[in-house]
Amino acid sequence: MAQKPRSRVRDITEYVMVRASEGILWPLPLSGIRAFGRMMGWLTWRLDRRHREVAEENVQWALGLSPAETRPFVRRVYRNSGMTSSECLMLPHILRRYRIADLSHYEGVEHLKGALAKGRGVIFLTAHIGNWELGGLALAEQSGGKLLSIARTLDNPLLERHLSRIRHQLGQTVVDRKGALRHIIQAVRAGGVVGLLIDQNQRKDGVFVDYFGRLASTTPSAAIIALRYDVPVVAGHAIRGADGKFEMRVDPPFELIRTGDTEKDILANTAMFTKHIEGWVRRYPDQWAWLHSRWRTRPEEEKRALKAQRAAQAAAAASGAPSP
């Protein structure tokens, strides 16, 4: 089904709101930027019914929260999302006042450096948890600046151009995930690091792996590149700590699964990577992007079964028989 065209008025309104927020945030210290983000997160939680309902449904079945537990939990998710958005928007300004090291605790950097020392490049996996933009900058700093990030282009072209300018100011190299394969291969062959966020729904060409007990369409790119070019894979995150600093953690490299069956190996390794990310989310649940429709794309066999069930129910209703 074709997507509904975006409204130009909506794009302009969103852009003006973001630029106005920048004007408000510019004179504020980091604590003020975060306070503003918390306030905007709360306001969005109040007004954004569509995504709030997505988040509530997700956490109730994935985390087993009761309705009474869900409301304050989702409010914290919005609060953290608001702080992250404000920090990302103002990163060039923040990093003129602070070094990344002033904002962070590092753990496991030796795993990244050890993988780089093999000379085959590194695939670095992360997720939309904590502050992934700051985590990317910390990763680039620790890897000598040789980081290529793969990201989805924003739906709003005005905001996409603005975000690209911010990333350029920060020295980041970011390419759109569509057509990114050539850039990824070039980067790893040059001994660089490729950062991939693999925790969002893959509408096309995904593989279905378990995530919180339910199949989720996931990009297989990391597994494909790692297996084909023998590239080490590590994972890490930038989690918001109680002291206001971020825990910049790099986990040990994965032991890739190799059975000789390419399709099965791609699926098995993608499942392993996804299960690793699930572990982070279970540990820091209110810092992950529950507002995203992670399980929206469904396997064809599941859709066929649902279609058959609905047809049987319709036939039963028409005949007056009990529904199956």
Image: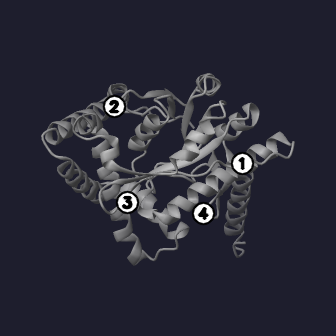
Other residues around mark 2 within 10 Å, as few (<14) / some (14–19) / many (≥20): some
Residue 270 x, y percent position in the rendering: 68, 48
- Tag 1: amino acid: Asn
Q: Is residue 70 toward the left or the right of residue 279 in the image?
A: left
Instruction: Say whether disc 4 or disc 1 marks the residue closer to the N-terminus.
Output: 4
Instruction: Name the front one of labels 4 and 1.
Output: 1
Secondary structure at numbered mark 4? loop
Q: Which residue is mark 2?
A: 159
Are dots 3 and 1 in contact, CB under 8 Å? no
The quarter in which the N terminus is drawn is top right
Q: Is residue 208 visible?
A: no
Residue type at mark 4? Answer: Phe
Q: Secondary structure at mark 2?
A: helix
Counting residues from the start of the chain, the first of labels 2 and 3 encountered is 3
Please name the colour scheme applied to the rendered image. Answer: one colour
CA gap between label 2 and label 3 equals 23 Å
Residue at 59% x, 43% y is 202
Q: Mark 2 against mark 1, which lies toward the viewer?
A: 1
Q: CA distance from mark 4 to mark 1?
A: 17 Å
Label 4, on which residue?
Answer: 212
- Mark on residue 77? 3
Q: Residue at x 68, y 53 (%)?
A: 272
Q: Residue furthest right?
A: 260
Would you name the residue on which mark 1 appears?
269
Q: Given contact means CB atoms under 8 Å apart, are the residues at marks 3 and 4 in contact?
A: no
x 51%, y 29%: residue: 148
Q: Is residue 38 above or below residue 114?
A: below
Q: Crowding near pointer 1: few (<14 within 10 Å), some, many (20+)? A: many
